Image (cartoon, rainbow, N blue to C red):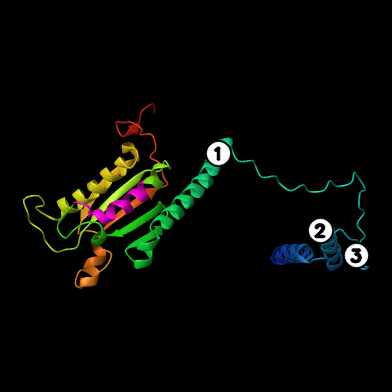
Amino acid sequence: MARRKRREEEHENHERWLVSYADFITLLFAFFVVMYAISSVNEGKYKVLSNSLTNAFKNVTGEPGGQPIAMIQGAPLLPVKPIAKLDKLPDQKKTEEKKVEQRKKMKNVANDIMDALQPLVAQGKVRLLETSRGVTIEINDSILFPAGQAKLQPASISAMLAIAQVLAASDFPITIEGHTDNVPISTPQFPSNWELSAMRATTVLRLFNDGGVGAERLTAIGYGETRPLETNTTVEGRARNRRVSILIDSNRPEEPTELRDGRPAGQ
């Protein structure tokens, strides 16, 4: 009898793992059920939420299948006012007005010079060009100077004085540029085209000064053959490159600022 009881006890011990296994399976099933419930989307609630958001931005009620949105009535919305542009600073206004006035003066000067030199303009000996800096008068040197010389021909003096009278009535800075072709020159007075072009520009400068243009407004520069307008390989091209250019500058020089250690003084 003792042996039979012992065998029954051993048999009960071998089957106890089934209880633990069943509990584990039950918990695993419950876990998957919970996970499925969490991951499922309620289509009805999702549709209500979607309609609510859409209608909120459209300021209308929801679709028939969704929930209506209650609009809270409050104070009326104020009309949107356009952003007013800031008025320009007084200094900027003065600068722009000054520029407009300068352009008008420059235009009048150019028209007066055109009238004074109309016969030469018609012959192609004089050209008036408007640039970003002002007005440039290009005069062919054949009507100003004999070949290889810097003394004005008597017939050209009256034309230069006519220009001087117009310029004397204005206050624009004036730069006189002398240009030559590439034919070399070597005389005691003019060792190269540099000296010839510079002397021709200075001769016109002196005539303008004698005609009433202030010396502080006048500048003479000799470029020689370095700035040709056309090729120097033809007779016509060389004739075009021999010229005197008179630049009536609309930009007045600014006050200089002293630099100290690479920086403006006072900084």
Rendering coords of residue 135 (x, y %): 40, 53
N-terminal-most mark, 3 or 2 = 2
Rendering coords of residue 37 (x, y %): 79, 64
> Looking at this view, is 80 or 196 the one in front?
196
Rendering coords of residue 185 (x, y %): 10, 58
State whether residue 131 appears in this view. Answer: no
Q: Which residues are magenta?
A: 151-164
Q: Amino acid at mark 3?
A: Gly
N-terminal-most mark, 2 or 1 = 2
Give the residue pinned by disc 3.
66
- Mark in the foreground, 3 or 2: 2
- Mark in the foreground, 3 or 1: 1
Q: Secondary structure at mark 1?
A: helix
Q: Secondary structure at mark 2?
A: helix
Left or right placement of residue 137 versus residue 225 in this view: right
The tag on residue 94 is 1
- Mark in the foreground, 2 or 1: 1
Q: Amino acid at mark 1?
A: Lys
- Quadrant, the C terminus: top left
What residue is drawn where x is 85% and y is 47%? Answer: 77
Left or right placement of residue 247 versus residue 39 in this view: left
Disc 2: CA contacts within 10 A as few (<14), some (14-19) or many (>=20): few
The tag on residue 57 is 2
What residue is drawn where x is 33% and y is 42%? Answer: 211
Disc 3: CA contacts within 10 A as few (<14), some (14-19) or many (>=20): some
